[in-house]
Amino acid sequence: MAAAFPHVLLGPGDDCAAVRPPGGAMLLTVDQVIERRHFVPGTALDLVARKAVARSISDLAAMGATPWCALATGALPAGFAQSDADALCVAIKKWAEHWHCPMVGGDLASMPDAASPLTLTVTAIGVAHPSGHVVTRAGAMPGDQVYVTGALGGSFDRATGTGRHLTFEPRLREAAWLLDTFGIRVHAMIDLSDGLGRDAARIAQASGVRIEIDADAIPCHPGVADWRAAAGDGEDYELLFTSDADIPGSVPSVGTPVRRIGTVGAGRGCVARLDGGTLIDLAGLGWDHA
């Protein structure tokens, strides 16, 4: 591990990991996936591990950070096969390193009940963008435009448990390009884990502004019924951000689409404007992970 990640001084195998701290701010996040809530029983363990890691990596992307290292814990149902536990550990390590975020430690424990859900928790640590700019939810300003990467909706088939929620790519490169190119003019940002409605409302609340989304401008994945389904589905993990800059329609290095979908104004709340001018409150439109 030291050869690939020289900042890791001591990895798994001792009571603590040891890493060489970087200059500048460090960002820390933790997230979990729980069987029957975030994935269905029978989901391939490799995909479970991928999602567990990717959710925390996506949080780092949402603040313009670069992954640095990670820790993971797992609560396994009683009777969980040792071979499966080993495979899960291998997969977690693999996916963490895929996003250049070496897994430096962790712990597995067995639950007393075979019916207990498999639960994985990943703590990821990142380094702030070299400019020092840490993008939060609280920086949106009246006059900003609201942008979103990619397309929304259809990420989680509730009937089968399949979908992009298991295979999404955290928008690390997109966030890095935004900050490299526009710097502090990227005012606020969030990853869309709970749906466009809920997450846009979080930026509005944290920033003390009013966000107005053009319903017709919301980019939908093929097969998504309408803008409501796209705004409320959740688990898209695209970046929603505000800026006073004129952002191009795609990220040059990777081709990810970027679309302007709304504006920031004075006031409070988050609404969608329909064709004809009708306004609909968006704050409750999303998916509850609780």
Image: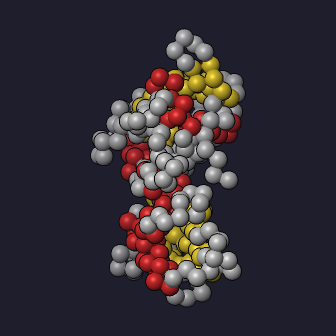
Report the residue at 51% width, 24% height from top. 215
When the figure is inspected, residue 257 is found, relative to residue 264, above or below; the finding is below
Residue 271 visible to the viewer: yes
Report the residue at 40% width, 71% height from top. 94
Q: In front: 139, or 60?
A: 60
* Count of marks placed on residues: 0
How has the structure been colored for display?
secondary structure
When the figure is inspected, residue 126 is found, relative to residue 169, above or below; the finding is below
Residue 228 in which image quadrant? top right
Q: What x and y, as percent, mark residue 283?
A: 66, 34
Quarter that holds the N terminus: bottom left
Q: What x and y, as percent, mark residue 185?
A: 49, 36
Q: In front: 94, or 186?
A: 94
Report the residue at 40% width, 36% height from top. 223
Q: What x and y, as percent, mark residue 158?
A: 53, 49
Q: What x and y, as percent, mark residue 217?
A: 45, 25
Q: In front: 195, or 76?
A: 76
Q: Residue furthest bottom?
A: 14
When the figure is inspected, residue 258 is found, relative to residue 32, above or below; the finding is above
Q: Residue furthest top?
A: 276
Residue 131 visible to the viewer: no
When the figure is inspected, residue 118 is found, relative to residue 11, above or below; the finding is above
Report the residue at 51% width, 82% height from top. 81
